[in-house]
């Protein structure tokens, strides 16, 4: 084990120490936001694997998160709860009697989502570029239509409520750290180099003998798995899901995160998740009535979204690279930074 | 099902299809010229509806003046969006431009939510468009007859502009090679602005007729028709104006007919366009009229 690995492990330990301290000392509101940061970190990192690292512009997260949420929710509800909830049409019997604990439910949620991603990948990766964006956007809407109409499985527009609250800060950050490790290792592997080659020049990648179709599929399916798990965590955190919950806004938020962090940079994504999630909490100020120098400004509900979208456009026009660009934070660069400073002081 | 019902459904489908076609033309033209899926196009259609309502309700204009004003104002908005948001990114990667387009789409939706609120507004339908025609016992709403006529008229005008005028020639040339066209001394930015103006103008026409068909509008109303129109543009072969119109008719007709023939599927009607899209991508990625995905030819 070299010095850098020890440093990485140490910082992860430090992170969990902070969370452990926060669990006892910070307000429940603050801890709730930190839980959200954990889940969104996992979602954003896997989203960045497709959009930033592989360069395939996709808008799938809300659809995949919805699938993961529904699968997990159906699995962790008890048969009695389901019977009480499905008042319009009774649930499909074999699904009603299916019941398991949280961890296997999350895994199955992830696997089902990954399988859907596998099926969806076939048509869209046959053509290049922009089609992926529209098809995945339409896919998210289709998921909403389907979950609205398959009443014996999803309870239709009534949604599923009273989900057991298994999600804790440890589940969120445990998965977030696990996802980060898997995705970072993937990016630094043979696969990751192939993905970057696809992003930078697909024709050259093909010429080098890379099977670009399966490289894109690998990225897409990996992301789908983690997005499904994230959906399960969100479902158990919010304890209620309905077809209208996972709208395009979720995708939009993740898109802002990965753009702010830098498309293709996982450490940038981690930083940006904290900045954007906490920033959007702070931005709630603009929706509340304010008194500035005796001037009364009434709260404008919905203003936050307008600010969000203007920010995204401005970032794209003026600061396309985001915080980190395509670079990653590494201990070497940190050491070099300090060394340079020392030399400068002498 | 008797003949009367089938006839009514056909007219219904054709009129819905011509609306999709009108909106799809905007997608296809912008894509043909600058290779950008203009995500905000559906929202520009929504803006057209609100401009028309504002003209009639708040400015007390006669309906034709309000409609005309709305179309012109929407065309200007399209140009403005291009100049402010897309033009700075002309030389950036296509992903950057796409993300900006999503930002614009979200901005328009939320701005109108803040200004007009989320409660659906009634669209005042002028009495000319309100009545019905009774042909031998088959009842057609006026609007269902007028919409396709208007749509085809605009399509013919557009085809004339594209193929018989200098500006049209410049637009078609742009879709092959922007740099060469620039070298030939054409004001490329102006031509792109004209393309955005035409696309947004037609989106406003589509929006106004959409609003008269379903006279309750809200700021999120443009999303679904926008997406389906995009599906229509891909189905027809993106980059081809005729293809967009044909794709629109196909999607509109099949949506109506599937629901008419298989009523239990009615709940899934919004998903059909995407099934179409996926099948097109699987079996004929160039669409009905398109020749090559990477080169538009109108």
Image (tube, coloured by chain):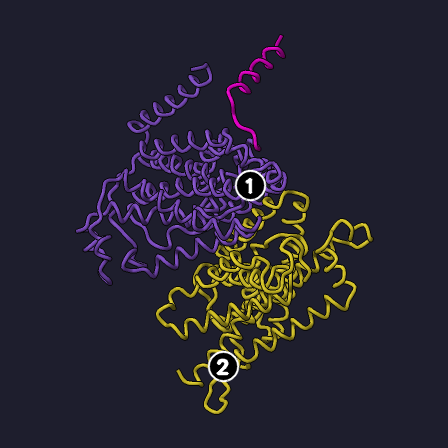
x and y percentages locating residue A266 in the rendered image: 49, 32
Q: Which residues are magenta?
A: A325-346
- Could you tell me residue A72's position as x and y percent? 30, 45
> Which residue position is annotated with label 1?
A55
Which tint is chain A?
A: purple
**Distance (Cα) linking label 2 and label 1:** 48 Å
Q: As displayed, is residue A117 above or below residue B264?
A: above
Q: Is residue B121 above or below residue B281?
A: below
Circle 2 or circle 1, nearest the eye: 1
Q: Secondary structure at mark 1?
A: loop
- Mark 2, other Cα within 10 Å: few <14 / some 14–19 / many ≥20: some
Dot 1: few (<14), some (14–19), or many (≥20) neighbours within 10 Å? many
- Work out whether residue A292 or residue B188 is closer to the camera in this orientation and state it: B188
- Residue at image point 37% right, 49% down: A66
Q: Residue farthest to the bottom?
A: B136
B12 and A189: which is toward the camera = A189
Q: Nearer the viewer, residue A284 or A318?
A: A318
How far across and how far down the image is residue B156, in percent? 67, 73
Please name the residue shown 58% across and 69% down the image: B246
Chain ID of residue with mark 1: A
Q: Is residue B283 magenta?
A: no
Q: Position of residue A43 (x, y in %)?
A: 42, 40
Question: In the figure, what tint was chain B given?
Answer: yellow
Give the camera-side residue of B126 and A96.
A96
- What residue sits right under mark 2 in the picture? B141
Query: In terms of secondary structure, where does tag 2 sit?
Result: strand
Question: Relative to B190, does residue A333 appear above or below in the rendering?
Answer: above
Whether residue A293 is visible to the viewer of this picture, yes or no, is no
């Amino acid at each position: 084990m070299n010095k850098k690995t020890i440093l990485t492990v140490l910082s992860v330990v430090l992170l969990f120490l902070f969370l452990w301290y926060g669990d006892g000392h910070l307000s429940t509101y603050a801890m709730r936001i930190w839980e959200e940061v954990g889940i969104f970190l996992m979602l954003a990192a896997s989203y960045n694997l497709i959009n930033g690292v592989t360069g395939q512009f996709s808008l799938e997260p809300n659809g995949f998160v919805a699938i993961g949420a529904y699968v997990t929710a159906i699995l962790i509800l008890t048969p009695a709860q389901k019977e009480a909830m499905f008042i319009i049409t009774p649930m499909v019997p074999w699904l009603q009697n299916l019941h398991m604990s949280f961890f296997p439910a999350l895994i199955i949620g992830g696997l089902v989502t990954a399988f859907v991603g596998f099926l969806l990948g076939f048509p869209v990766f046959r053509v290049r570029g922009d089609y992926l964006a529209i098809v995945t956007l339409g896919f998210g809407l289709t998921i909403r239509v389907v979950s609205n109409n398959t009443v014996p499985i999803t309870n239709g527009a009534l949604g599923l409520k009273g989900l057991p609250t298994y999600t804790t800060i440890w589940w969120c950050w445990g998965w977030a750290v696990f996802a980060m490790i898997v995705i970072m290792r993937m990016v630094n592997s043979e696969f990751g180099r192939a993905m970057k080659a696809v992003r930078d020049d697909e024709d050259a990648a093909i010429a080098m003998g890379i099977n670009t179709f399966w490289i894109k599929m690998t990225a897409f399916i990996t992301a789908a798995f983690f997005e499904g798990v994230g959906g399960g965590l969100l479902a158990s955190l919010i304890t209620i899901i309905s077809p209208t919950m996972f709208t395009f806004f979720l995708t939009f938020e993740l898109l802002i995160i990965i753009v702010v962090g830098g498309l293709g940079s996982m450490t940038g994504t981690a930083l940006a998740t904290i900045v954007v999630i906490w920033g959007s909490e702070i931005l709630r100020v603009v929706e509340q009535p304010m008194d500035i120098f005796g001037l009364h400004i009434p709260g404008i509900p919905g203003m936050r979204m307008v600010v969000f979208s203007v920010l995204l456009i401005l970032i794209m026009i003026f600061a396309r690279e985001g915080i980190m660009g395509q670079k990653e934070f590494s201990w070497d660069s940190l050491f070099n930074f300090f060394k340079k400073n020392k030399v400068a002081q002498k | 099902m008797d003949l009367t019902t089938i006839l009514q459904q056909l007219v219904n489908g054709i009129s819905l299809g011509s609306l999709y076609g009108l909106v799809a033309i905007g997608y296809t033209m912008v894509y043909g010229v600058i290779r950008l899926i203009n995500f905000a196009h559906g929202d520009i259609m929504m803006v057209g509806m609100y401009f028309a309502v504002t003209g009639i309700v708040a400015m007390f204009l006669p309906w034709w003046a309000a409609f005309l004003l709305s179309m012109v104002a929407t065309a200007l908005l399209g140009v403005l969006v291009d100049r402010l948001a897309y033009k700075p990114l002309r030389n950036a990667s296509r992903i950057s431009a796409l993300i900006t387009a999503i930002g614009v789409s979200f901005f328009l939706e939320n701005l109108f939510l803040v200004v007009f609120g989320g409660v659906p507004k009634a669209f005042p339908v002028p009495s000319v468009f309100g009545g019905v025609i009774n042909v031998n016992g088959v009842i057609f709403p006026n609007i269902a007859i007028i919409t396709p006529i208007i749509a085809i008229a605009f399509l013919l005008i557009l085809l004339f502009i594209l193929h018989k005028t200098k500006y049209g020639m410049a637009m078609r040339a742009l879709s092959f090679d922007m740099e060469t066209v620039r070298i030939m001394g054409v004001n490329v930015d102006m031509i792109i602005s004209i393309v955005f103006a035409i696309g947004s103008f037609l989106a406003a026409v589509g929006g106004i007729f959409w609003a008269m068909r379903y006279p309750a509008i809200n700021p999120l109303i443009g999303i679904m028709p926008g997406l389906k129109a995009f599906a229509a543009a891909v189905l027809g072969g993106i980059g081809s104006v005729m293809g967009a119109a044909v794709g629109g008719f196909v999607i509109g007709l099949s949506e109506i007919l599937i629901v008419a023939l298989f009523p239990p599927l009615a709940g899934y009607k919004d998903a059909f366009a995407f099934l179409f899209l996926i099948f097109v991508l699987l079996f004929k990625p160039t669409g009905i009229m398109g020749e090559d995905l990477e080169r538009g030819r109108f």
